[in-house]
Image (cartoon, rainbow, N blue to C red):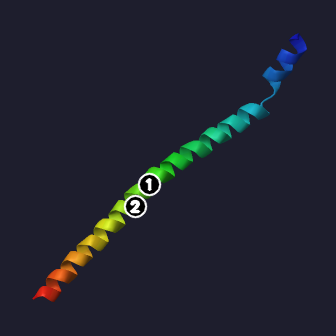
């Protein structure tokens, strides 16, 4: 049992895999929120263009 515990504590590959998993998860969350902001900006831009086009055609 002691040798199993010492082998697990010396093995760093599992810790590295967990760290990479956490980084990928954090990156996914950041991309989701960033994409949401970009989407809102693009929507507002097209909405402004639509309003200006409608106003120009109404003259």
Q: x, y percentage for residue 5?
A: 83, 16
Where is residue 50 shown, x and y percent of the image? 25, 77
Mark 1 burial class by Cα count in 10 Å: few <14, some 14-19, many 20+? few
Q: Is residue 58 left or right of residue 13?
A: left
* Quarter of the image where the N terminus is located: top right
Query: Residue 37: image x %, image y %?
Result: 38, 56
- The secondary element bearing badge 1 is classed as helix
Please give the residue where the numbered disc 1 appears in the rendered image.
Answer: 34
Q: Is residue 30 above or below residue 1?
A: below
Q: Nearer the viewer, residue 19 or 40?
A: 40
Circles 1 and 2, Cβ within 8 Å, touching? The answer is: yes
Which residue is at the front of the view, 56 or 6?
A: 56
Q: Which residue is mark 2?
A: 38
Q: Quadrant of residue 41?
A: bottom left
Could you say which quadrant of the image residue 18 lies in?
top right
Q: Badge 2: few (under 14), some or many (20 or more) residues near its Cα, within 10 Å? A: few
User: Residue extending furthest top?
Assistant: 2
Q: CA distance from mark 1 to mark 2?
A: 6 Å
Q: Residue at x 55, y 48 (%)?
A: 27
């Amino acid at each position: 049992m002691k040798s199993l515990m010492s082998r697990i504590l010396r093995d760093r590959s599992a810790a590295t895999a967990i760290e990479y998993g956490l980084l990928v998860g954090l990156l996914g969350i950041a991309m989701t929120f960033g994409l949401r902001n970009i989407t809102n900006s693009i929507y507002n831009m097209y909405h402004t263009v639509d309003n200006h086009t409608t106003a120009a055609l109404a003259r």
